Amino acid sequence: MIGKLKGKVDAVGESFLVIDVNGVGYEVQASSRTLRNLKPGDNVSLTIDTHVREDAIRLFGFQSELERSWFRTLQSIQGVGAKVALSVLGVLAPQDIASAVALGNWAAVEEAPGVGKKLAQRIVAELKDKAPALSLGGHAIPAAGATSSSAIEGPLGMAFAEALSALTNLGYNPAQASAAVAIAAKDLGQAADTAGLIKRSLKELAR
C-alpha cells in the first residue's frame, strides 16, 4: 500500500494531480482546497490513502495525517463516499469540520458540493463523539466572528486543545466539552489562553 508520495507536480486537473516521483507519474485524487495551492513544477509531499478494487487502484492525497483521518472518518457515515468526503474537505479544513460538529453547525457542512441538508445534519450528528478526539491532532479553530472556512492555528489552537483535554479529564463528555470550548473561544477571541478557555467553558457547561 502507498502511504506517502513525495515528488514534483507534473499536472493539475479539476479533481486530481499527477505527481512525478523519480520519473513515475502517480495520478492522485485530492480536494479542491489542496489542488488550489498547487501548480506544475511545485515540490509536493502528500499523505496517501490507497483504495484497491478489482478493477482499479485509486490514490487519494492529503496535506496531513489529520486530514486523511477525517477523510476516513467521514466515509464511516451512511451516504458519504470518497467523492463526498473530498468535497467536504474541499470547503472545510479539518478543524473547521471539528468546530462545525461541536457547534452543531450543519449549515457549514452543507456548503460542500453534493451535500444536502439531511446529509449535512447526519454528518454533524454522527460525528459528535468523534470530532473531539480528531480535533486534538490539529490545534486550529475558527477565530471569533470568522466564517467556517477561515480556521486559525497557533497559540489559540493549542489553548483550545489543552482546554478540551482538561475538561475531558475532569469527566465531561467529549462532545459537550468540545462544544463548550468552541463557544468560549468565539467569545474570548484570539487572545484567549488555556485558563481563560477552561473558566469560560465551565460556565457554559454549568448552564
Image (cartoon, rainbow, N blue to C red):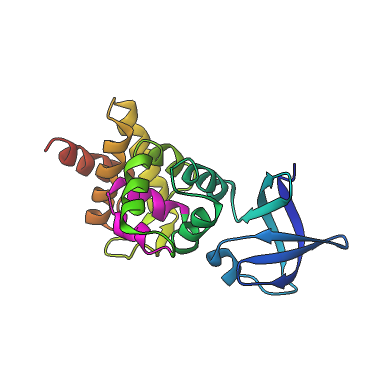
Residue 128 percent across, percent down from the top left: 34, 40
- For the C terminus, the quadrant is top left
Residue at horizontal 22%, vertical 55%?
Answer: 187
In the displayed image of the protein, which residue is found farthest to the front?
Answer: 55
- Magenta-tinted stretch: 94-112
Task: Please state if 133 lies on the left or on the right of 201 as rendered.
Answer: right
Residue 197 percent across, percent down from the top left: 27, 45
Residue at horizontal 68%, vertical 72%?
Answer: 12
In the displayed image of the protein, which residue is found farthest to the left?
Answer: 207
- For the N terminus, the quadrant is top right
Residue at horizontal 45%, vertical 54%?
Answer: 154
- Does the magenta portion include 197? no
Residue 83 percent across, percent down from the top left: 54, 57
User: Of residues 67 and 85, which is closer to you in this image?
Assistant: 85
Up/down of 61 relative to 130, above or below: below
Up/down of 159 relative to 37, above or below: above
Helix, strand or loop: magenta stretch: helix
In the displayed image of the protein, which residue is found farthest to the right?
Answer: 23
Residue 142 percent across, percent down from the top left: 35, 58
